[in-house]
Image (cartoon, rainbow, N blue to C red):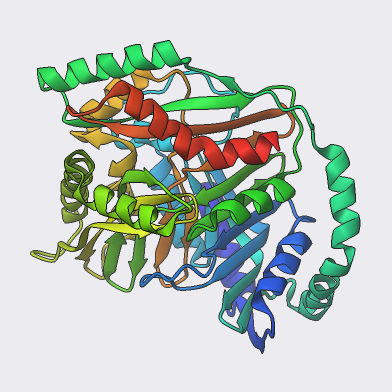
Amino acid sequence: MLLTALIRFFVILFFSNLRRVKTQYISNPESFKKQLLLWSSQFDEVVWLDSNNYQQTYASFDAVLAVEAFTLFQTDDFDAFNQLKEYQSATNDWIFGYLSYDLKNDVEDLSSHNFDGLEFPELYFFQPKRLFFLKGNTLETHYLNVVADALDDDLKAMLAADANASETNDKDASVEDSQIKIKLRIHKDDYFSKVNEMLAHIYRGDIYEANFCQEFFAENTRINPLETYSKLNAISKPPFASFLKLYDKYLLSASPERYIKKEGLKITSQPIKGTAKRSKNKTEDLELIKALSEDIKERSENIMIVDLVRNDLSKTATKGSVRVEELCKVYTFDQVHQMISTVTSMVNESTHPVDIIRSTFPMGSMTGAPKISAMKIIEVLEETKRGLYSGAVGYFSPDNNFDFNVVIRSILYNATKKYVSYSVGGAITAKSDPLKEYEECLIKAKAMREVLEN
């Protein structure tokens, strides 16, 4: 309470016009993105969001960079959403950060007791001094008045970053551990046993579907986070990629999934359920798309989560406004084909943006149905605390809009503990075959494993 009151007082007293905005033309956006990301590595707080030029109807920017905290807020799961609501309202500015999966304990009467090798805070947001929005050839900079005079020098440093990239990469290579030994938290036979236990819950009618996840990890390992992220992003080129740095903790994400977006009074959620591998043979690849679009099991998984999302959105929606704009549409990515649905709603202007997120969190695609029962069973059967994995990274804007991804296809790294982790999961339904579910997990894990073991 005191923190937010001080923030409000300080902002009102000294910053009636918070940010100085400047627009300029960028001749080579792809090259500039690399320079921008290299330049950002000097800061302790970094959030980078990149659509990788994926043609999506609902994109606001091609890429966004937020660096250097002016104010920040972090907490555990106790009363987290109310505190976030106060911080977002008091700041009344751009804030960037993340929501961990275990904020479920604030939303419902749940708990998390599984092993946590990463030790990220449950929630973390900061108000950046420097902001960069790239759309096409246009760069828009939003600098707080306290650093506005540094803009020209910063831009010169960014443009020089490429010239120093080869030297930086040479230094980075010496940091990486060339012998990363990846271990499984749940071994294959145990995985089959746990999936069969999940199926027993489904046959009894406790749940209809649940997302069951497993962790792959490496101990006593050092990686170069920015270099590893660049490699992962190059392999997958997803529409919701993100790089997050908070001092010694890093997220390197190649996420293909949007959790939720607010633009004006419209809310959009795009759950993914249904995955198929790619083929280098064009004819075979088209056949894989067709097979996925017609797969009864995959469609039933997706439709169950669509129903859950519709129910979640209805909690804050204006009457009759919840719509399914796309149902079980197959999208193609570099590594896999995915089945995605798009669900939208409208909200009242008086509805607080944090309340919209609280009423839909955690996202249905990473829990199951019914949601609370599924989360309870997940907690018992999984071996690892999910933390930021299957949480969300994104931002709130000064006009109460927001956009968050789903943290999947991601590597998490605690540099101090030298602990590297990535998790993968899949939806278990009555039609699930444990072997096929295990193989699907390996397909989803392929890019992360390649990057770390290369």
**How far across and down, in percent of the image, does residue 362 sit?**
34, 41
**How far across and down, in percent of the image, does residue 152 sit?**
80, 81
Q: In this view, does 391 lie to the left or right of 158?
A: left
Looking at the rendered structure, the number of numbered marks drawn on it comes to: 0
Q: In which quarter of the image is residue 22?
A: bottom right
Q: Please give the name of the residue rendered at 21% of the width and 32% of the height, measured from the top-left corner.
A: 209
**How far across and down, in percent of the image, does residue 136 sit?**
56, 81
Q: Please give the name of the residue rendered at 42% of the width and 37% of the height, measured from the top-left corner.
A: 101
Identify whether 18 is placed above or below 308.
below
Q: Quadrant of residue 19?
A: bottom right
**How far across and down, in percent of the image, does residue 167 sit?**
91, 56
**Residue at the outermost left position:** 320
Q: In this view, does 47 lie to the left or right of 93?
A: right
Q: Please give the name of the residue rendered at 65% of the width and 31% of the height, measured from the top-left corner.
A: 420
Closer-to-camera residue (61/314): 61
Closer-to-camera residue (251/51): 51
Identify whether 332 is placed above or below 197.
below
Q: Quadrant of residue 274?
A: top left
Identify whether 215 is placed above or below 246.
above
Q: In this view, does 81 lie to the left or right of 249?
A: left
Can residue 401 be seen here? yes
Closer-to-camera residue (157/236): 236
Q: In this view, does 292 lie to the left or right of 233?
A: left
Q: Please give the name of the residue rendered at 71% of the width and 65% of the height, measured from the top-left corner.
A: 34
Closer-to-camera residue (342/276): 276
Can residue 102 be seen here? no
Quadrant (top left, top right, bottom left, bottom right) of the C terminus: top right
